[in-house]
Image (cartoon, helix red, strand yellow):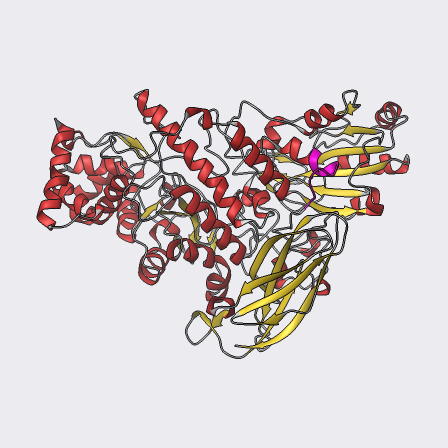
Amino acid sequence: MKKILLLAALAFAAAACHHNPTPEEQARLIIPKLSLEEKTALMRYDSPGAESVGILPYNWWNEALHGVARNGKATTFPQPIGMAASFDEPLLKEVFTAVSDEARIKHRQALADGESGWYQGLTFWTPNINIFRDPRWGRGMETYGEDPYLTGQLGMAVVRGLQGDPDAPVHKTHACAKHFAVHSGPEWNRHSFDAEVSERDLRETYLPAFKDLVTKANVQEVMIAYNRFRGVPCGANTYLIDTLLRGEWGFKGLVVSDCWAIHDFFMPGRHGYNEDVEHAVSEAVRAGTDLNCGESYRHIPETVAAGLLDESELDPALTRILAARIRLGELDRNNEPWAGLDDDILEGEEHRALARKMAEESIVLLQNRDGILPLAADARIALVGPNADDREMLWGNYNAIPEFTVTLADALRDRIPDLPTIHGCELVSPEPLSDKDIAAILKQLEGIDIVVFAGGISPRIEGEEMPVELPGFRGGDRTDIELPAIQRQLLAALHQAGKKVVLVNFSGSAMGLEPETETCDAIVQAWYPGQEGGTALANILFGDAAPSGKLPVTFYRNISQVPDYEDYAMKGRTYRYFEGDPLYPFGYGLSYTSFAYGEARVRKDALEIPVTNTGDSDADEVVQLYVRRPADPEGPLKSLRGFRRVRIPAGETVLVKIPLTDKTFLSWSPEASKMVPLKGDWELLYGGSSAEESLQKIPYRY
């Protein structure tokens, strides 16, 4: 009966409006029928619904960082930082279309079981588009790297894959751009940290990806960050939410708090911004934070009773909340366009193949001395290292629990059944290996020519606000970027013993690998490559697939090249402002073939770049376009403004076209106090990485 009342109200809305009513118009007819307690319930992430009008319970908390997460069986794709290394927007959209298919199936299964709990809904707090400005940040692996343009392009692909057709009467799922707006560590003080940045850095670095997702990709949710911004908690920050997000960008969707972030406004030892929960609630609601993940909005009735908030001030948030549920079909669950999706899609063969393809494209070849890779089929190989057979490490964080996972050990044993496999050492240890330990390892490697060393770190020790205190690690972040000392010791011993060493480095972030460039013959950056990571790596190592990933972050030589972690100014950070000599630059990655860039020319508002595969194997190349404005010495050294991933057969030339639009020439305008296309002299730089020596330059007057 109550559901009938709700549907009748929606039908009345159609008649009253004399047209197909918008979800907002339908929502406004429902709101007057709600009690204050029901309104309060609807503004909670774990909403029990509104019984009087037949609105069913719904839990907004769901994650799909690289697959439908924390809800049992689902396909686990590579960690986002790895997918960023693919520079492949179409493939990323395909991945998240697969994720949204699995999401609809998971949601349907939950409803059939009468459940509406955590991780069972259609609203996903994905993607994380914060800028990975410092390699010490443990959550950087959740992002798409250090560059605003790359992050925006890939973030939009994620949103479009998750949400589907924005004009469809029922949305497939809803994505959420997080964490708005200036947030990238430290993890240990995020509940009390105040991020101070110049207006230029804000608009040039920290905001562009959010603006792209809002204004171009129609993202339906934005999540505010824990920290303060210029003294005001992000969830109460009217400059961020009202002036920028809703004002300048015209965002109509839902603003959600990070979990328990509003409690940080007043909790002892945190922001100290409000005296109690009622004052925190009133400020958050008035600023435009619609939905609360946490307990704070349970206190809305007391806040209203205290005169700190008028009940009518809840209406904008309720309108947006109900409109979102209407768009998802949540108020009329009989309308399910994806009811025909087969349950077998979940972690099925097609999606695993997609995970494997993405993993192959994410792997970055950093060093290949004397062409040791690809490995010869008859090479005498051993697998050593703490990450050789670790399934959970491959999954990254915010992950599904797949039923089927292939480790590097699994994949290599399929090729070499009697493969010697040695753990060798722990990931991190305060104590070095003894001479006896090393001698025992070398004894097992007698007759072995090549050691594949599976090392690096793990999502068990880097990630979100973790209780980890180990040498080089603090609270989920890192205090150093070096390969852990015990692994470095073992690699040096293998090298000294005359072994050829292929280091497969698993990590969610840049590592300081300068000593390893001497002790290792090849270095492969694997990230956390998902459930098909082992197969993808074996395919790369043996040449069944060519490495084609490019670094989405700068690999510094050591921590001395990185500024103070708690300083959010961009000076000296990322390839855009770093003036030193990195170990491996942003956009860098080797192949098993070679590419030659010819002389580019501008034709019809596009840069046409001839690229030739000068080697003897077909392969993909990521062609990159950077721009620089010589008249702006305080600006970036260069900025990525275009890229194309292209397949080039051996011996052939492909003409790669990258559009030149107003967006290509966006730059900071002190007069306008924002980013605008600036007329004048520019330089166009193109090539296979951001390294100055690998780029060709042509002048351009815009």
- Residue 129: x %, y % from top left: 48, 49
x then y, percent, for residue 181: 43, 53
Q: Nearer the viewer, residue 227 or 450?
A: 450
Position above or below: 286 against 532? below
Q: Give me the residue at 31% from left, 22% from top.
A: 112
Q: Is residue 609 visible?
A: yes
Q: Can see residue 308?
A: no
516 or 91, nearer to the observer: 91
In the rendered structure, the answer to whether residue 318 lies left or right of residue 512 reads left
Depicted 501 relative to depicted 578: above or below: above
**In the image: residue 258, left or right of residue 531:** left
Q: 307 or 287, which lies in front?
A: 287
Q: How many marks?
A: 0
Residue 521 part of the magenta segment: no
Give the x, y percent position of residue 469. 62, 35
**Above or below for 95 versus 432:** below
Residue 463 at x, y percent in the picture: 55, 38
Image quarter for residue 263? top left
Q: Quadrant of the N terminus?
A: top left
Q: Is residue 467 left or right of residue 675?
A: right
- Write down the quadrant of residue 268 in the picture: top left
Vertical side of 165 occupied by 461: above or below: above
Dominant secondary structure of the residues highlighted in magenta in the image: loop
The residue positioned 80% from the left and 23% from the top of the image is 420
Give, as a single range, the part of the protein colored magenta.
538-547
